[in-house]
Image (tube, rainbow, N blue to C red):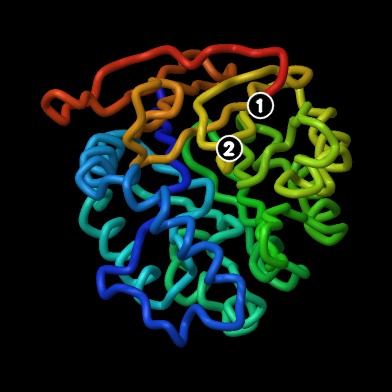
Amino acid sequence: MFRLAHISDTHVLSPEGVRWRDLLFNKRITGWANTKLRRGRVHRRRYLEAVLDAASRADHLVVTGDVTNLALESEYREARRLFDRGAGAAEISIVPGNHDLYLPSISREGRFGRHFGPFARSDLPEFGAGVAAGFFPFVRLRGPAAIIGLSSAVPRPPFVAAGYLGHAQLQALSAILEHPEVAARVPVVLVHHPPVDSRNRLLRLRDGLADAAPLRRVLARLSRGLVLFGHLHVRVRCRFGALEVVCASGAALDHPDDLVRAGYNLYELDDRGVVGMEAKVVDEADGSLRRTDIPTRADCV
């Protein structure tokens, strides 16, 4: 039995604080205001450390983006330190979220790859380099699972958080799914933005996945597998054809609702596919993690 832990939206804050020159005249000012007004009060570092410690007991840990809060160099360093320390017992695969590529300059300098490149290294040399998004998609072959990482993170104007995969990634994903090493395993597709989204058009345009429909067309051929995402800060699952589509909530969130509260999802896989699924959430009383179900909905919002 292969045990796969899934966390998302850690939104690691800079331990050094934020300099005003990092905020002025760019999108970060809106993110900083959000942190001060809301996110700083509900994201708990001690919860994240407890979640990482527990999730590291799985065979593999996947992270579906928004690792950092403002894509600051200091946040990247702190997130890498936390992963190296708190999840050192488990191998990790990470894809970026919109907060990790907050500005065009972050993408141009390759900040995500410089800090998290080892967590996105492909086992198939023909994939994982040279496509439009950098080294995405990547493929990691682990036991019965073929873990496929996509990047939907693109810099956007203020107040817009929508994602986009692009033709090159979707074309590469299609080829990956036909590879014999992948076809023999259970595909586990990682993406930050929701691949299934029934919200109104305005919300989808503002913070959905722009090419979710083309992604679903590529995935529709699969007879088994998992599609894992984050971004929505709620723990929920749904079905798309033969696939389980599952969202993880924020891994550090302090919230009274178990669907939102800090924790991680845990999946059990064998050669047949997904044979078990549950969530572990932080107990406010003593900081331990307790089991809860992941509810099924007709959609993933």
Q: Is residue 2 visible?
A: no
Can you identify the residue that label 2 sits on?
Answer: 232
Q: Which mark is residue 301?
A: 1
Residue 204 position by quadrant = top right
Q: Name the kind of residue labelled 1 in the image.
A: Val
Instruction: From the viewer's side, name the closer residue of 146 and 292.
Output: 292
Q: Name the kind of residue labelled 2 in the image.
A: Leu
Relative image position of residue 148 (x, y in whole percent): 62, 46
Drawn side of residue 216 relative to residue 194, left or right: right
Asked if residue 54 is positioned above or below residue 12 in the image, the reply reads: above
Most distant residue in the bottom direction = 21
Most distant residue in the left direction = 286
Q: Is residue 266 visible?
A: yes
For the point 65% across and 18% down, the residue is 238
Relative image position of residue 292 (x, y in whole percent): 36, 14
Drawn side of residue 36 relative to residue 196, left or right: left
Residue 247 position by quadrant = top right
Is tag 1's residue or tag 2's residue first in the polypeptide sequence? 2
Instruction: From the viewer's side, name the closer residue of 203 and 127.
Output: 203
Most distant residue in the front direction = 37
Q: Are marks 1 and 2 in contact (CB under 8 Å)?
A: yes
